[in-house]
Image (cartoon, rainbow, N blue to C red):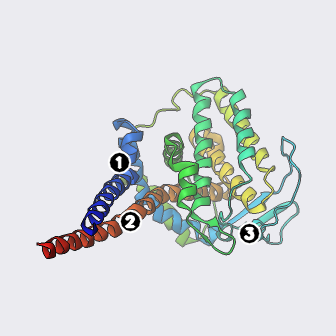
Amino acid sequence: MITASLQILLSLNLVALIMLTYNYSISKKDIVFQSYFNQEVLEDIHHIEEFNNVVYPILNDLSNDSDFRIYRYIDTLNCPIYLPQEECNVETCNFKNFPGEDPINTVDLKYMGEKYTGQQGQNIWISIYEDLGKNTSSDMHTHMINLIKGIHSSISISITEQFDYGNKTGPNVDFFFWRVGYYPDRIYNLYFLESFLMQASKFLKINNIELQTNTQQKVQGLLSSFNQMPIYKFDYFNNLNEQDLKQYRDDIKLLDSYMDCVHCKRCKLNGKVQIHGLEAAINLLFDEKERVQLEKNDVVAFLNTFQKISSSIKSLDAMFERRTQIPYENMKLTGYSLIILTILSKVILWKKK
């Protein structure tokens, strides 16, 4: 009777081990990406990740530099849809501005991290995509929508990395997969946005911006990295015309106005910075006149946006690694249990003999 029970337990443990091994394999990022994307896209992603590994530490360093932490903005109220104007009651929603000219707010971005649940923003994003969809008339505009979706993916990843649990913040792996990890298009749009920012960075000039010598050297190090790394072919926007560019700017204005619908001041600020950063990237790539006239606040928004997207791509690896750790730990426990049961079964059979 005991031997039969052990045999049943052995069989159940073996089945559990096989299932956990399978779950472990399908949670690994490389295997998941191979099922999501074709070989050409995988090669593009690989190039972007190689490049990101080079620029991420530089961008991270720059984002902590005093020259690129201070951001100035006007807190507008141009929400295009009706929402009850309730203040966010979560402590991390609010922040203090530096004294400045009214209505211009000055903030230190170092203390404006995205630490919130993100539960209240979905209706706003739905309205954004509905409005943008009305204007879809060309492949060029579809590309712009994908860039905006890339920002959405990045914000979702930031939320899941610093999820607000009430008494603490930390990674929320399940929330990551619910919001991003199970959606190949959302992952792809993040890489698409990174490649767009990579291209825009090649046109960034800081000659007319007052920076500390140390900061100038860091930026030059970032810009020189573009010459050292092979940039893959990126020709999605080759046929962009003046009408497309005007549509992009209209989209940016629309997106910025929707950020005024966000009740959480910290969330609103982070959204506006990244929209401003995307606007700066568009000017860098497509408008030589605007490119020359970029002000320091534009460059602050651009580099901080680039850092956010770069950080989100690094977080993809971390989230998939955390996901594999769960079945891996269970595999170890099940494996140990299988060994113990096997030994016990053999001991009982030996004694019976």
At a point 34% along the width and 37% down the height, the residue shown is: 39
Which sits earlier in the primary sequence, circle 2 or circle 3?
Answer: 3
Q: Nearer the viewer, mark 1 or mark 3?
A: 1
Residue under numbered circle 2: 330
Which sits earlier in the primary sequence, circle 1 or circle 2?
Answer: 1
- Three-letter residue code for mark 2: Asn
In this rendering, does residue 206 appear at all? no
Residue 92's label in the rendered image is 3
- Three-letter residue code for mark 1: Ile
Give the vertical position of 264 relative to 139 (above or below): below
Residue 253's label in the rendered image is none
Name the one closer to the observer, 81 or 304: 81
- For numbered disc 1, what is the local secondary structure? helix
Task: Estimate the spatial distance between the alpha carbons at disc 1 and disc 3, rounded to whole Å.
Answer: 37 Å
Residue 31's label in the rendered image is 1
- Three-letter residue code for mark 3: Thr
